[in-house]
Structures are given as C-alpha cells and as structure tokens.
Image (cartoon, helix red, strand yellow):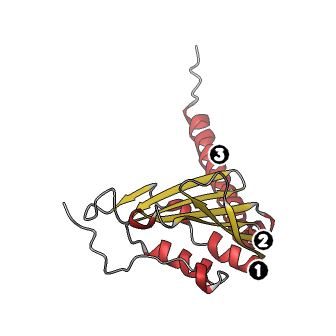
Amino acid sequence: MTKVSFEGSQIYFMKILYIAIGFGSFIIYILYSNSLSNSRIDSKQTIKNSQFSLSLSTYNHAELISESTMTYQLKNDSFTITRQGKFAKADSLLFSSTIERNLVGQIMMMKLDTLDDIYINKCVMGTSGTEYHISIQRDTISKSIYLHHYFLQQIEDLIVNINKVVPEKYKIDYISSNTRQNCH
C-alpha cells in the first residue's frame, strides 16, 4: 500500500491562505482609509445638511423670584430668546432673528456631545448660584448638559458664540474661570 502525503499540499494551501488574508487586509485598509478621508471631506457638507437645535436655559437662584428663566434657542438658522417667569403660564418672546449658518457650524464643531451630563460645583449650595441647562439635538443625536455654578471652557466658548447674536441687554453672563469649584 502506498502512503499518500498531504503535507506538501497543506503547506502550499497555507501559503496561499496567508497571501489571501494579507491581500484582503490590505484591501480593507485601503477602503477604510478612503472612507475616512471621504468622511472628513463630507463633514462640512454634513454640517450644512444637518438638522440642529440647541437650547440654553439659565437662571440664578437668588434672582429667580424677581427675574426668570432665560432660554436661548438656536434652531438651524433661527434664533430666539424667551423668558419664563416663575408664575407665568407662557414664555415671553424677547428676541427673534435669523443667524448665519457658519455660526451654527462653529457650535456644531465644538463637540459638546463629548461632555459629561452633569457638573456640580460643591462649593456652592444647591439652592444658590447660577444654573445652566443645555440641550442639543443634531439629526438623531441628543445630549443634555446640566451645570450648577460650574465653569467649563467649552461652555464659555459656546456662550461667547451665542452672545455674538444676542442684543446687549440679553447677553448671557457666565461665571468666571476663577470660580472656586474644588471643595470637598
């Protein structure tokens, strides 16, 4: 009886398999890197075509009774400011205008969706200080950020951008970067 050896065939088959895997990996790498460069190119187009809204509400506990909650709403290319009094049944429209789409694009590029949901300054009692609530909607992505008398550079940058289109008497005051926040 003769012995048939598959060992040579197995080695040949394994070499072909390794070459195919290597070639397949190379093709996947090329396709993936092309898709990345295309997504970078399309990011500006995505901003132009995205549905976007941002709402920033702010109030100060000490002023809430005499003042009210102010809400700054950006929705695609429109901008409104409303005030809700403590005992009011409806919001009062204070200001409305259209805005440049490039301002919306700047805000969308700030990556606010990467921030945590809650920031609390433990140096300030929960019943005092200024609170900020930010809601963001971009296409199907939603994000809410709540800050209780807490400074974040990204939020300061956001407020600086929003204040570019806000009349002087409705400008948003944000707390200082020198605000003490590290109490235990």
Tag 2–tag 1 contact (CB < 8 Å): yes
Mark 2: which secondary structure?
loop
Q: CA distance from mark 2 to mark 1?
A: 6 Å
Q: Residue at x 57, y 27 (%)?
A: 5
Judging by the rendered image, the residue that carries numbered circle 2 is 77
Specify the quadrant of the image occupied by residue 77.
bottom right
Q: Residue drawn at (69%, 62%), measured in percent from left and top?
A: 53
Mark 2: give few (<14), some (14-19) or many (20+) Cα within 10 Å. Answer: some
Please state the total of marks drawn on the protein image.
Answer: 3
Front position among marks 3 and 1? 1
Q: Can you give x and y, in whole percent of width and height, for residue 147 in the image? A: 43, 61
Residue at the spot x=36%, y=80% of the render? 177
Compared with 141, 57 (above or below) is below
Of label 3 and label 1, which has the lower sequence position?
A: 3
User: Looking at the rendered structure, which numbered label has been put on residue 100?
Assistant: 1
Q: Amino acid at mark 1?
A: Glu
